[in-house]
Amino acid sequence: MSGDDLALIIGVILLVPLGGLFAAVDSALNTVSVARVAELVKDGRAGAQRLSAVMADRPRYVNLLVLLRIACEITATVLLAGLLIGHLHLTVALVLSAVVMILLSYIVIGVGPRTVGRQRAYPVSLAAALPLQALGALLSPLSRLLIVLGNALTPGRGFRQGPFASEIELRELVDLAQERGVVAAGERRMIQSVFDLGDTPAREVMVPRTEMVWIEREKNAGQATSLAVRSGHSRIPVIGENVDDVLGVVYLKDLVAHTYHSADGGRGRTVGELMRPAAFVPDSKSLDTLLDQMQRTRNHMAILVDEYGGIAGLVTIEDVLEEIVGEIADEYDTGEVAPIADCGDGSYRVSARLPLDDLGELFGVEIEDPDVETVGGLLAHLLGRVPLPGAEVSTQGISLRAEGGDDARGRVRITTVMARPEPLPDTHGMDAAHGAGRDGAQRAGRLGADASGEDGHGTGH
């Protein structure tokens, strides 16, 4: 064995573990938490201050580690090929060197060091902080130049912030953590819900305009207090000429202050005098942006405006938080309707506000209608009019029957819909179905007449 062969062997032996070391540090840096490093700095841990400086510019150091690891792998491959070419046929030497380096790169550089880096993330990162800063000072210009060249050749935004996980990869990590028992099922749902906030518009969780509790500005404080107590709401929108003319929001604490200590029970002050400014936001605003705005302005209610400038509904901070932690029930929510209730025999009682996709999943069909998004909207669309209790329609093998009653204003509202598989048609069954349809139409007509009478004599809040 010549001196050149020995030098090549030593070079390969040194470069492969060195590449593994860079891979371990890379994995460790991507595992450590900035908050945890800050705690180590407060505790005076050796190397913590330097590691904090590295974490402040983590993309730069990760890019540098990737460059050094690749350089070690490629250089070791070239040295091994040069060694084998002197003793074997050229083709055999090249193939053998490629196979050997693939195995070494996978085991010695890939799997082993990265596992150690994740398992011992903080000791590895603390020990590597000082050498990393020194390497960064020497090789950072070269690393930045290569990234600029790569971005110039790559379409799109390029590789600017380092090889960090995308949202999809983070979701997969959360699922894997649940499978291994690191996080509970409820915690996983909450984490996934946080990701979904940015993709969920406010209109999907709003209280629709038809279900809003509001009060006219001419009403007195005593009447508003009574409405707040009966409805269970501590904030009520104040309107002018109609529901689209929202002037502000009246707070229960302001009403109590002017009724409890007033000799006339608040009849001397109007709601318009006590209301506060309302926050108006477009119904397309994402929930994460809306939540941030509510936190900054300390506002717990927002009025949603549609694309035509009309009032679409309202949303509270509770509605947004429920998208993360699930349903939040209080003493006033005992009468709320469950979104889906299994009634047996393949039938379900669903909320009129249930999305069509959820209804389709119950019956294994795909319900698509570009004009509506909810079961109640589908019912009205198929009927061609506002549905009343008892109205029935069928679509895609599903029979829908409207259920409801009087709301707080004495008007008939559809709150739930009974959904069941449509029976197979036969001669006798079809005749009976037509008869039932006529009876249902007659009942709906009578209900419509009764509802019209009630609405005509209804009073405002």
Image (cartoon, rainbow, N blue to C red):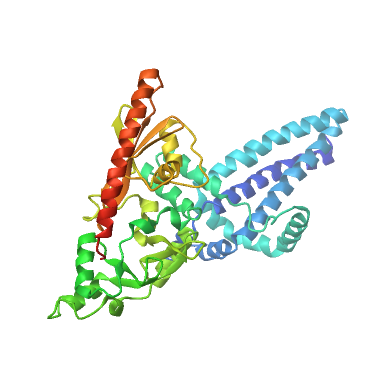
Q: Nearer the viewer, residue 437 or 231?
A: 437
- Residue lying farthest top? 427
Measured as percent of width and height from the top left, residue 139 is found at 72, 61
Q: Report the side of 74 relative to 444 (left or right).
A: right
Left or right of 366 in this view: 183: left
In the rendered image, residue 433, in percent from the top left (x then y), is placed at 35, 27
> Is residue 38 found left or right of 53 in the rendered image?
left
Residue 192 image offset from top left, x and y in percent: 45, 48
| Residue 58 to residue 239: above or below | above
Q: Is residue 403 visible?
A: no
In the picture, measured across the screen, residue 330 lies left or right of residue 40, that is left
Q: Is residue 389 above or below residue 434?
A: below
Say which residue appears at 71% left-offset and 54% top-offset.
156
Vertical placement of residue 386 versus 232, above or below: above
Q: Where does the N terminus fall, quadrant-wise?
A: top right
Q: Nearer the viewer, residue 30 or 278?
A: 278
- One can see residue 21 in this view: yes
Q: Residue at x 50, y 59 (%)?
A: 284
